[in-house]
Image (cartoon, grey):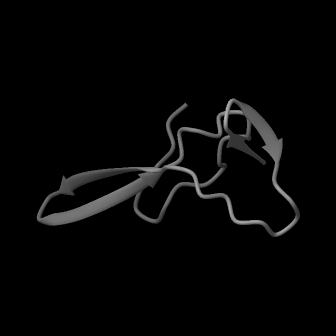
Amino acid sequence: MQRLLGDRFALLAEGETDHHMIDAYSMQCGKTNHTLYLDLYHCHTPAPDTAPEGFTILR
C-alpha cells in the first residue's frame, strides 16, 4: 500500500494506518436503504472475490 506525500508516493510501514478517501453510495432496495462504501483509489489491488451480504458481483 502506498500513501501520497506531497508530490510523491511512499510505501506504508507495516501496520501504519492509510488515511485515504473512500466513496459512499446510498441506494434503496425496496423499503430498505443501504450505504455501500467503495475504495476507488487503490486500483492496483485485486478486485474482491466476494460481495457484501445481499449483493452480487457482476463481471
Q: Is residue 5 above or below residue 44?
A: below
How many numbered marks are there? 0
Left or right: 57 as drawn, with respect to 43 = left
Residue 24 x, y percent position in the rendering: 36, 52
Of 32 and 41, the residue lying toward us: 41
Task: Please give the name of the residue rendered at 50% of the width and 36% of the height, measured from the top-left corner.
Answer: 58
Taking the spot 31% from the left edge, 60% from the top edge, the residue there is 35
Q: Residue at x 43, y 55 (%)?
A: 37
Within the image, what quadrant is residue 54 found in? bottom left
| Most distant residue in the bottom direction | 15
Question: 49 left or right of 53?
Answer: right
Of residues 11 and 44, which is closer to you in this image? 11
Query: Considering depth in this image, is 15 or 24 the residue closer to the camera?
Result: 15
x, y (%) of residue 6? 67, 37
* Residue 59, quarter of picture: top right
Q: Is residue 3 left or right of residue 34?
A: right
Residue 44 placed where, x, y %?
73, 34
Name the residue nearer the viewer: 49 or 2.
2
Q: Residue furthest front?
A: 6
Question: Residue at position x 11%, y 65% from top?
Answer: 31
- Spot occupied by residue 49 in the image (x, y as percentages of width and height): 66, 49
Kindly give the residue lying farthest to the left in the view shown. 31
